[in-house]
Image (cartoon, rainbow, N blue to C red):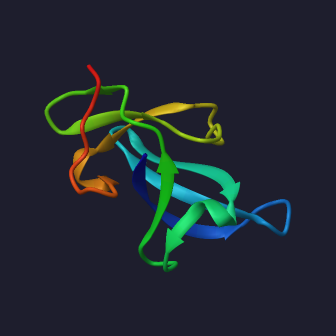
Amino acid sequence: MMRVKVERIGGGLHPSEVVVAVETRTGREELSVDGRSLQGSSQDSSLEIGWPVGQDEAYYLVELPNETFRGFWRVWVPKSDVTSAGGAARAVA
């Protein structure tokens, strides 16, 4: 599995939820996730995602575990924000 870097920005509707922001090619996207799905500190958190489903020179196309507030499931994120337990990411293109 892969992880994408996120920033915790607040609480969700339920006590176990956290609102996070992920940087994308078109700007910042926000979504609500279960707090247990995050790893790291509030300044340096990451969210579990699947393997990237696409790539270009500097970005991976990833599918998020929940829909963003603007209705996206897949977003382009900087390659530098995606990691795996083994280090660098690999994409299926």
Residue 9, horizontal then vertical, whole percent: 59, 68
Q: Nearer the viewer, residue 7 or 36?
A: 36
Q: Residue furthest left?
A: 57
Q: Quadrant of residue 53?
A: top left
Rendered view: 27 above or below 9: above
Q: Nearer the viewer, residue 7 or 90?
A: 90
**Left or right of residue 92: residue 14:** right
Q: Quadrant of the C terminus?
A: top left
Count of all numbered marks drawn on residues in the image: 0
Residue at the spot 52% in from the left edge and 57% down from the top edge? 21
Q: Quadrant of residue 55?
A: top left
Residue at the spot 52% in from the left edge and 78% down from the top edge? 42
**Left or right of residue 34: residue 1:** left
Q: Nearer the viewer, residue 86 or 70?
A: 86
Q: Residue furthest top?
A: 93
Residue 57, horizontal then vertical, whole percent: 13, 32
Rendered view: 24 above or below 39: above
Residue at the spot 32% in from the left edge and 39% down from the top edge? 25
Q: Quadrant of residue 68?
A: top right
Q: Residue furthest front?
A: 86
Residue at the spot 34% in from the left edge and 58% down from the top edge? 85
Residue 59, horizontal then vertical, whole percent: 25, 37
Residue 36, horizontal then vertical, whole percent: 66, 65
